[in-house]
Amino acid sequence: MCKVIVISTVGIIYDGITSVITSYLEAMNRENIEFYVVSTIKSEVKIEKKLKKIGCHIVYLPSRRNHPIRYFWGLLNFIRENKIEVMHAHGNSATLSIELVAGFLGGCKKRIAHSHNTRCDQIKIDKLLRPIFNIFYTDALACGEEAGKWLFRDRNFIVLKNGRDVEKYLFSETTRNRIRQRFNLSDKLIIGHVGGFFEQKNHRFLIEIFRKILKMRPDARLFLIGDGPLKEEIQSSVEDIKEYVIFTGTVDCVGDYLQAMDGMILPSLFEGLPLVVIEWQINGLPSLLSDRITSSCKITDMVEFQSLEVDCNLWAEKVLNMIDRSNRKKDSVVATRLVKEKGFDIKDNAGILRRIYLS
């Protein structure tokens, strides 16, 4: 039995990295592998239950953010006492050195660093820890070329694309009608966004775009799926149009909510390879993204890019034009085929990851 410890530096929360981890673990043939998933900062109960249901063990340690030294020693001791052979650490900076050094000292022979973004918030710490980071990882994975070059620079790495279960996100007219009826929005134009309320996601700009859309299409509504520290600020900023903006919080069935949408906007300041954009395309949704986001996520013609420097009116006009040109059911079928062809099928990628663990 191979023992694998999986770590997200941001915790077991509703975010892109956790979504990647749970998707791989659910899709993988877990025979002869025992998985331990670390709670580093925060742990969502529903996600824990999902992981436990498929046989994963949850490891509770002191907060990585508030008590990094206690966290380090707790992780090292757990690895040593349980004879963990493989570490798979997910993050976006050289602060992954904390996990990698603990893994090395604890006896992990394979220490995988997995890059999920194209920049980080801790620039000075990242620079300081680079020499240590470069010594202690044995395998380098990245969600895309840009994310790999960011974390590993000119060193070798393997791109393991953020795959999705395509069947889960296929367009369904029945589900679309059910969700729209639940919110009494059967005849409305619905614009959507999926992501945590963090600076990176640029919600303030998104709200300005929606205000322009509302002037052009008074029947428009905005669905904001997610949670985070800036949520209250954004709620306050739309007080005057609150009947047009729906805050769903975190939801387990994001795929169902996507069915209700007509178009998506992602004006992020930076991203690695955003999983949500893959999901949107499988669902046949026109998606307008900021030009700060990697073009690697563009699998179909449903995705277009726009500069954050241009006026919000141009964003509004463009996304409405994209929606008018779309053919939802047909686009979903085409996208499903292309997603599989271009290596974004989670089942195939989970098989690759399993082989890396066992090699």
Image: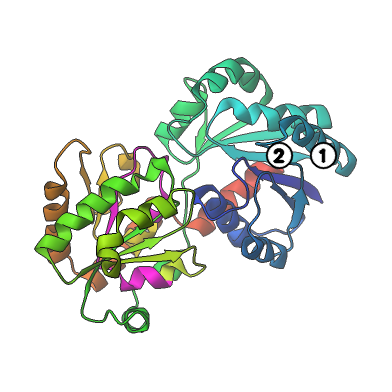
Q: Is residue 243 visible from the viewing direction of this image? A: yes
Left or right side of 274 for 266: left
Vertical arrangement, residue 330 with respect to residue 139, above or below: below
Q: Which mark is residue 203?
A: none
Left or right side of 175 for 186: left
Left or right side of 289 for 348: right
Whether residue 272 is in magenta: the answer is yes
The segment highlighted magenta reads 256-276
**Dots 1, 2 in contact, CB < 8 A:** yes
Q: Quadrant of the C terminus?
A: top right
**Percent position (x, y) of residue 154?**
47, 19
Left or right side of 200 for 156: right
Name which quarter of the figure residue 306 lies in.
top left
Q: Earlier in the sequence, mark 1 or mark 2?
A: 1
Mark 1 surroundings: few (<14), some (14-19) or many (≥20) residues within 10 A: many
Q: Which residue is mark 2?
A: 87
- Foreground pick, 156 / 199: 199
User: Residue visible at 73% across and 45% down?
Assistant: 5
User: Residue visible at 62% across and 22% down?
Assistant: 133
Q: Which residue is mark 1?
A: 79
User: Residue visible at 29% across and 58% down?
Assistant: 238
For marks 1 and 2, give the CA distance. 9 Å
